[in-house]
Image (cartoon, helix red, strand yellow):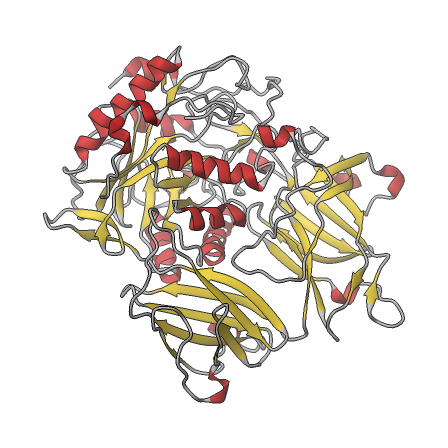
Amino acid sequence: MDLIDAIKAIDKPHEDDILNRLFTPWGEKLNKNNVLKEYPRPQFVRDSYVNLNGFWDYCIVPDKEGEEIPSQDIMEGKILVPFSPESMLSEVERRLEPDQYLWYKRELPTLTRKFANSRYLLHFGAVDQFADVYVNDRLIGSHSGGYLPFTVDITGFLNFSEDGATAGGNSLAVRVKDTSDSSYHSRGKQTLRRGGMYYTAQSGIWQTVWIEEVPATYIREIHIRPEEDLQTVSIEVSTNRPCKVTLKAPGQEMVKSPASGDSYETVFAADASFSSDTYPSMGEDNIGSGYCYYHFRLTFKEPHLWTPEDPYLYPLHIEAEEDKVRSYFAIRFFSTEKDDKGITRFCLNHKPYFLMGVLDQGYWPDGLYTAPSDEALIFDIKEMKRLHFNMMRKHIKIESARWYYHCDRLGMIVWQDMVSGGSSYAKPVVSYLPTLFPKVFGRMNDGPAYYKTFSRGSAEGRSEWLREMQNTIRYLYNVPSIGTWVLFNEGWGQFNAAGATVMAKELDDSRPIDQASGWFDEGSGSFRSVHNYFRPLSVEIDKEGRAFVISEYGGLTCHIDGHSSVDRVYGYKKFDTLDSFGVAYYNLINASLKPLIPKGLSGAVYTQVSDVEEEVNGLMTYDRRITKVNPNLDPNMSKNLNS
């Protein structure tokens, strides 16, 4: 073990730092009158769409003064939504403290009704961390959790014109509170004491806000499951009331719904056949709610399978009376299976597939959690593909829906982390000692002492995390590119990982699960998953017969003046020039990592996509202006590991 490098990697808070003002190329050219206008939910698209991004009024007040909607003369200025107030792109650059409220206000645009008795749905991509929503000074809904979307039906709170056709002169206000890492709520890498591997805390609205009009009868959700046989796709459509539901392939005739009781030839490519289950069936979790569920089953004789090398997506249109939704799906299957030598491997479409992964924090110097544009999201994915990665581990963050869409269409497998929480972490226990003595801390048994050790003493906090884990899986279930759920990372707020694995499997038994990435493994899940930054890379035989992955390694650092947030360097091995950095990187990949594949290594996740603040171990600089390695200089990197 390189003990000196390990000691240097002890991270310390530097909350008094003033970060250098770095802009990405997209943030530098941001059109403030046209911010993130793309439809924010690509797997559930309607034509009715009113984007509410742009300048809103805002103020930050002490919590004792935040109970009432502030009058206009109290508002302090304008904030550019959906950028958090801590970010440069918001034009506020102020931190929301745990004992403060952040208020947003704006007037809603005039809405012209397309349907009689239609409903208006107000959507928030994500608001960090607790949000209360008011329309025309009336509280209409609240939401907790800073990473998942939520929707409120605002129809009954709007003022309509006399003819009932238009709505105008309506106000919207949002009140936000964010405890960051001063409580047990999920916050990921955010901290009020920035430094090392923990970054600037952000708050407030950080994903797109929009309104859409839906008919009185409308589609609520779709649930798409490609089956293990690589020929069948099961689709469940949920509506708010009974109706006739139809699936359609663009440019083809309709596929009839089960309402008619007849069967029909499919219009999907590759000679699919159509069948359905009960019509309609009531979901067990919605008995008495009036929600209806319609089940479709499509079978493909010659399916076009999705892979990173050939990311084929099938379009899908769904109609429920007047409501129309566009979506897509892929035919693919992720699993862990034994190869012809009896070694358990990660498999794509039942074939061993080596995961050349890279850690993705999803941070931006100008927008923090919010990418300045759709093109910025695309750039990160394409640049990692150019560097011959086929997997990105979305680390301790849930990204905007468009990022997953780009992974789907560009061909990038995603390992999706759950967002960590818990009270203040005891770093010697969860970070330093496991790094020094990995075999000692390789296993952990659940119990009260365990809760205390990993900052999970709050029963309410444990229940909250389990709900958020379930909702994360439900929210992202349809994403074709997600290949694995990662439940806990390095003991950060970990508890009962074995029980959480069972719960996750009940929701989704079609994907592998990385129960505990790094250490504190409880012996279940699909992987033996280790982090190794300071020792020679090696393969560990797992006695449970699970696949073996190095879910973090690398972390090589190279600070580049003018492209870093601070002059200080945090990382795991320092290099002073890009040449020496590149040599070390390719030696690590070619001499240390690749020889482990025949020995049983199923995948590895290099740290990381880009520098983030003080942590300068990225393959790109934080501002995305310099990529530190050149794959064209190393012919060994161009070889497809899965050919």
Residue 525, horizontal then vertical, whole percent: 29, 50
Residue extending furthest toward the left: 341
Q: Position of residue 384 (x, y in %)?
A: 40, 35
User: In which quarter of the view is residue 289 placed?
Assistant: bottom right
At 35% from the left and 17% from the top, the residue drawn is 581
Q: Residue 249 versus residue 166: which sits nearer the camera?
A: 249
In this rendering, position of residue 173 left or right of residue 326: right
Residue 520, located in which quarter of the rendered image?
top left
Q: Can residue 495 be seen in the rendering of this structure?
A: no
Q: Quadrant of the C terminus?
A: top left
Q: Residue at x 28, y 63 (%)?
A: 228
Q: 182 or 317, which is in the foreground?
A: 317
Left or right of 551, for residue 192: right
Q: Is residue 46 above or below residue 174?
A: below
Q: Position of residue 334 (x, y in %)?
A: 30, 54
Identify the residue at image location x=37%, y=72%: 298
On the picture, is 300 further left or further right than 17?
A: left
Within the image, what quadrant is residue 548 found in? top left
94 relative to 75, above or below: above
Considering every residue shown, the one lying at the far bottom of the view is: 261
Residue 24 appears anywhere in the view? yes
Q: In which quadrant of the rendered image does the N terminus lie?
A: top left
Q: Residue furthest front?
A: 251
Which x, y percent locates residue 406? Answer: 48, 47
